[in-house]
Image: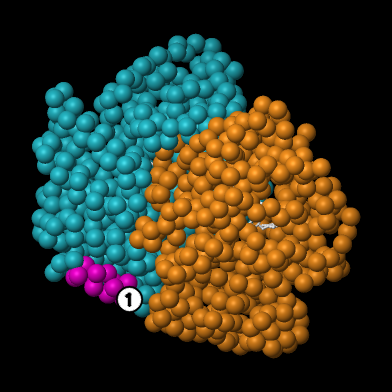
Amino acid sequence: MTEMLKAETEDQVLDTIKWAAAEKKPLEVRGTGSKSMLGRPTELDHVLDLSALSGVSFYEPAELVVSAGPATPVAEVEALLNDHNQQMAFEPPDLGPLLGNPVGGGTLGGLLACNLAGPRRIKAGSARDHFLGFTAVSGRGEMFKSGGRVVKNVTGFDLSKLMAGSYGTLAAMTEVTVKVLPAPEKTRTVLVNWAKDGIYDHDGTKAMTEALASPHEVSGAAHLPAAVARRSAVDYVAGGGRAVTAIRVEGPEPSVAHRCEALRTLLAPLGETEELHTENSQTLWREIRDAIYLAADQERHIWRLSVPPTEGSRVALQILEGRPGEALYDWGGGLIWLTLGVAPDACANVVRQHVAAVGGHAMLVRAPEDVRDRVSVFEPQEGPLDEITRRIKDGFDPSRILNPGRMHKES
Amino acid sequence: MSAQVIADPVELEEDLLEELRAVVGDRLSTSAAVREHHGHGEGFPGVFPPGAVVFAHSTEEVSEIVKICAVRKVPIVPFGTGTSLEGHVAALRGGVCIDLTQMDKVLNVNAEDLDVTLQPGVRRKQLNEYLRDTGLFFPIDPGADASIGGMTATRASGTNAVRYGTMRENVLSLTVVLPDGRIIRTSRRARKSAAGYDLTRLYVGSEGTLGVITEITLRLYGIPEAISAAVASFPDLESAVNTVILTIQSGVPIARVELLDDIQMDALNKYSGLDYPVQPTLFFEFHGTEAGVREQTETVEGIAGEFGSADFQWTAHAEERNKLWQARHDAYLACKALRPGATVYATDVCVPISRLAECIMETRKDIDETGVLAPIVGHVGDGNFHLSPIFDPNDPEEARRVDELNERLVLRALAMDGTCSGEHGVGLHKMDFLIAEHGDAISVMRTLKMSLDPDNIMNPGKVIRV
Ligand SMILES: Cc1cc2nc3c(=O)[nH]c(=O)nc-3n(C[C@H](O)[C@H](O)[C@@H](O)COP(=O)(O)OP(=O)(O)OC[C@H]3O[C@@H](n4cnc5c(N)ncnc54)[C@H](O)[C@@H]3O)c2cc1C
Ligand SMILES: Cc1cc2nc3c(=O)[nH]c(=O)nc-3n(C[C@H](O)[C@H](O)[C@H](O)COP(=O)(O)OP(=O)(O)OC[C@H]3O[C@@H](n4cnc5c(N)ncnc54)[C@H](O)[C@@H]3O)c2cc1C
């Protein structure tokens, strides 16, 4: 039986963690609490429910920052920013549907704890790059505040960066502050439509690399193989039944039009080009951001591969050789969402072997619990790296009460 | 700056030195001149020499050196070029200084993936010279020609931070020798680290207190198709600052925007032989495509005009631009030249952009009332600015006034949700401000330090007291 411990205030978070630390009771730290969470499955008797710590506590558009409770829905923050033509530039994804959950369920705290970012990461950086400060309670039951509202500081160890991507294993955040930026006025996307049949993953990589090396300030570079492109809601993308490479530019109208034109000229020798305007562009990049094309088939396992961009298509095609599955490329080829047919080990050895050969890493994003229990969900760490990770965990959470086993199997 | 500094150097035993010599041969020095050179940084009085200085040539050597010291719990201070401003390299407990300047090779430029891997002793100007023919560049440019290792360790930034970020955003991966001598690589070649805690960012800004950085992979950028620079002078300081604020809030992707007050302009004119109006002035730089740069320049010219600047002048001429930025980078030397024999101390607060005008105006009033000679310069696009009080360190009365001015400045910035250090770091001198700013987080940082360096041998006495 799982017991929910719902904290209504920051002080209750503190009390709960103090209690848990004293009693050595492990806690699952939860934002809005979807059961099937990312990472290794953990079966804990107690859930620290932070859902009451919700709502924007500070937002001055002129200051270009927003502070909010950790359980504030990302959608709520985005709606507020949108009213002032601002945005979180790292383009927070909503991976709910991909993981079989409803749209719009994610929280700001969860987003930062998982360090998620969308297609604009190649230009604007990841969640952690926009994460300015936070208040949290460590596993020692100590409340602390780090960073603040300034975009630049060098005051000791960078705890915000350590929290980003720690999956709630170091401290429970009770307030977070992120940087916001003016939203671009216009968006255009250059599409390269490849020929009807055949595999164009390598060509797509080449087009993305060329576009990214150009001076046109590309803010999104993705490649959709034909089977994937067919599922887009944007006609221009789905209609042709072809593989499509998409390159995005954003900014004020004249400059966007100019850069779009220049990119079309640059890419024309590779294939037939087309352009999408703001609204269609927004639809397309939302789809790519959320890897929505891969959501429909909930059976297959999903891996998320991080590789050097120029190696992306080679790695993906090697893994897919003789295996049912498909790939979606983002970040100029550096991020690959890969689906694979069901296998007891989710093909972990094959995937990790190919990825390791190019210095990349792989994370198992979607798979049934028993598979995620058997297979290392995150790239396994060895030797001194693993030891440092444990020492950091011990520093923050010596009794191992915050999401133990969520990232790596407890020994 | 005035905190009581207690030095307590350990004796280095002869057999330790012998063991070190077995690793580095004659690249070990115990001469007073070499030790003293390594025992102080820039701009702060006092020398705390290490017991010995070794000049390392490889990661493996550093690893051996650290192992030898770790066994005996002998302190270690990594050393880049010694331009840090807060007493970072002072060897408070003596020990062994590892000088990394001879590890100065660029190992691998990866033009397609826009990254470079290099040794820590490579200097920023050397790197850009090396990159010249590749069409790429590295944007972070602290005023000094610092080592990339030191810049990583201090999380340095410079005039380009608004557009390109600081070392924090531009270090992709590190090789680090841990306090027990083992070697780790913090992340793999692929950009996105999903493998565990973000060790790369933990070591960026660790000021030598968690290990020795022996290899760095940095992100590079394509040299923009077009670059233009501009200079505009303003009737008063507030108008200049408001121009910056509105520019940032409008989302103009400006590459550089630097504020110099009238005193600083006077100093620059004299030092660099220029003839700009002696008025509050902004230096700008715009990067992008031809069309983009034109558009940005026009937008900013419009904003500057609204705030009363009548002489917005821009140039796309590389030589003129270089002259402008060299002058900006020489601001510190120009201050020194204003009063020969005096010391220049650089303050370093940073506030949210919306509070910048208020903070600078109050500070300027404070300077005038204090009667200290203290020009203002700043990377104002991110809310960061420096006073450079020019004073006689042997005049205790004047030194005290400077100290108090700085203390009021820091408290003013903290009250505005700012920070005591935008880019220079904590080192020895800002530890007390760090406590004022971070309170409880200090204990978390201390725990972290103790988890990773249980014997406190890495640059002891810096950042946090153990
Ligand atoms: C590979 C991958 C898989 C994903 N799987 C799922 C999934 O199965 N279900 C789902 O709903 N979303 C999933 N997400 C989406 C992601 O978690 C959401 O987009 C994000 O917004 C989470 O919000 P949440 O409120 O659901 O957080 P939660 O799912 O409650 O938490 C996400 C992580 O953040 C930590 N966390 C949350 N709040 C805090 C806090 N205040 N302080 C410290 N740590 C905190 C949690 O402990 C957990 O490790 C996944 C994302 C990725 C990249
Ligand atoms: C005129 C002038 C202008 C300046 N302008 C700026 C500016 O605009 N922006 C800015 O950010 N700073 C500025 N600085 C400060 C200084 O240049 C930076 O802090 C710089 O990053 C220091 O680099 P360094 O190589 O001199 O390091 P050092 O001074 O040698 O060392 C600095 C710290 O880093 C540690 N360290 C050095 N190398 C390593 C390594 N390989 N591994 C682990 N630890 C290491 C040292 O132990 C020490 O704690 C300026 C300084 C001067 C004198």
Measured as percent of width and height from the top left, residue A221 is found at 58, 71
- The N terminus of chain B lies in quadrant: top left
Q: Residue at x 59, y 50 (%)?
A: A52
Q: Residue at x 51, y 61 (%)?
A: A77
Q: Which chain is cyan?
A: B
Q: Secondary structure at mark 1?
A: helix
| Crowd around label 1: few <14 · some 14–19 · many ≥20 (10 Å) | some
Colouring mode (rainbow / by chain / secondary structure / one colour): by chain
Q: Which residues are magenta?
A: B294-306
Spot the residue most to the front.
A8
Measured as percent of width and height from the top left, residue A22 is found at 67, 26
Q: Residue at x 53, y 15 (%)?
A: B16
Q: Is residue B145 magenta?
A: no
Q: How would you classify the magenta stretch by its main secondary structure?
A: helix
Residue at mark 1: B295
**Viewer-closest of B232 and B224:** B232
- Image hue for chain A: orange
Measured as percent of width and height from the top left, residue A374 is found at 84, 47
